[in-house]
C-alpha cells in the first residue's frame, strides 16, 4: 500500500469517474481475438479481488467459440428481461 497525496487522490478519483461515465453496456461480443497472455493477466488481477472470508471463490470461463458466445448473449438478455419484469 502506498498512500498518495490528497490532491493526487482527488485527481485520480475524478479521472476514474470521467472514464467510467463514458462506458455503456455492450450487447455484442467483438470478433477480434484477444491475445491469451492478456486474458491470463486480467484473470490473475481479477482473482485477487477481496471478499469477506478472503477465500477468493471466483470462477472464470474464457470463451472463444462464437456460437457459444451467441448463446451466452441470448441467455443473458433473457435473464435481464426476466429481472426487469420483476422476477
Image (cartoon, helix red, strand yellow):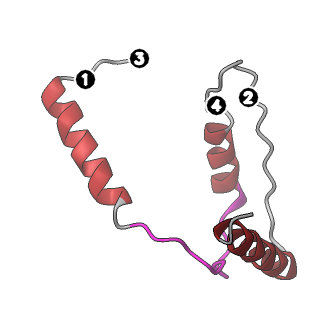
Task: Residue 77 in the image: state x and y as whole percent.
Answer: 71, 76
Q: Is residue 15 left or right of residue 48?
A: left
Magenta: main secondary structure equals loop
Residue hosting label 2: 56
Going by the picture, which residue comes out furthest to the left? 7
Task: Say which quarter of the image contains residue 73.
Answer: bottom right
Circles 2 and 4: CB atoms closer than 8 Å: yes
Q: Write the start and end of the magenta stretch as one range.
A: 23-36
Report the mark closest to the observer, 2 or 4: 2
Task: Say which quarter of the image contains residue 41.
Answer: top right
Task: Residue 4 in the image: state x and y as whole percent.
Answer: 25, 23
**Which comes before the other along the chain, label 4 or label 3?**
3
Residue under the point 79% across and 59% down: 62
Task: Say which quarter of the image contains residue 35.
Answer: bottom right
**Which comes before the other along the chain, label 3 or label 2?**
3
Alpha carbon distance from label 4 to label 1: 22 Å
Residue hosting label 3: 1
Q: Quadrant of the N terminus?
A: top left
Task: Residue 53 in the image: state x and y as whole percent.
Answer: 71, 18
**Which comes before the other along the chain, label 1 or label 2?**
1
Give the total number of marks visible in the rendering.
Answer: 4
Q: Is residue 30 magenta?
A: yes
Circles 4 and 1: CB atoms closer than 8 Å: no
Report the mark closest to the observer, 3 or 2: 2
Residue hosting label 1: 4
Residue hosting label 4: 48
Alpha carbon distance from label 4 to label 3: 15 Å
Work out whether 87 lies above or below 41: below
Closest to the observer: 21 or 2?
A: 21
Residue under the point 79% across and 32% down: 57
**Which comes before the other along the chain, label 4 or label 1?**
1
Q: Quadrant of the C terminus?
A: bottom right
Amino acid at each position: 500500500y502506498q498512500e498518495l497525496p490528497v490532491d493526487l487522490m482527488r485527481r485520480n478519483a475524478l479521472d476514474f469517474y470521467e472514464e467510467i461515465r463514458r462506458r455503456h453496456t455492450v450487447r455484442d461480443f467483438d470478433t477480434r481475438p484477444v491475445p491469451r497472455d492478456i486474458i491470463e493477466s486480467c484473470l490473475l488481477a481479477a482473482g485477487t479481488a477481496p471478499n469477506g472470508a478472503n477465500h477468493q471463490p471466483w470462477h472464470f470461463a474464457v470463451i472463444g467459440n462464437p456460437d457459444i458466445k451467441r448463446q451466452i448473449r441470448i441467455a443473458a438478455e433473457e435473464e435481464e428481461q426476466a429481472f426487469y419484469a420483476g422476477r
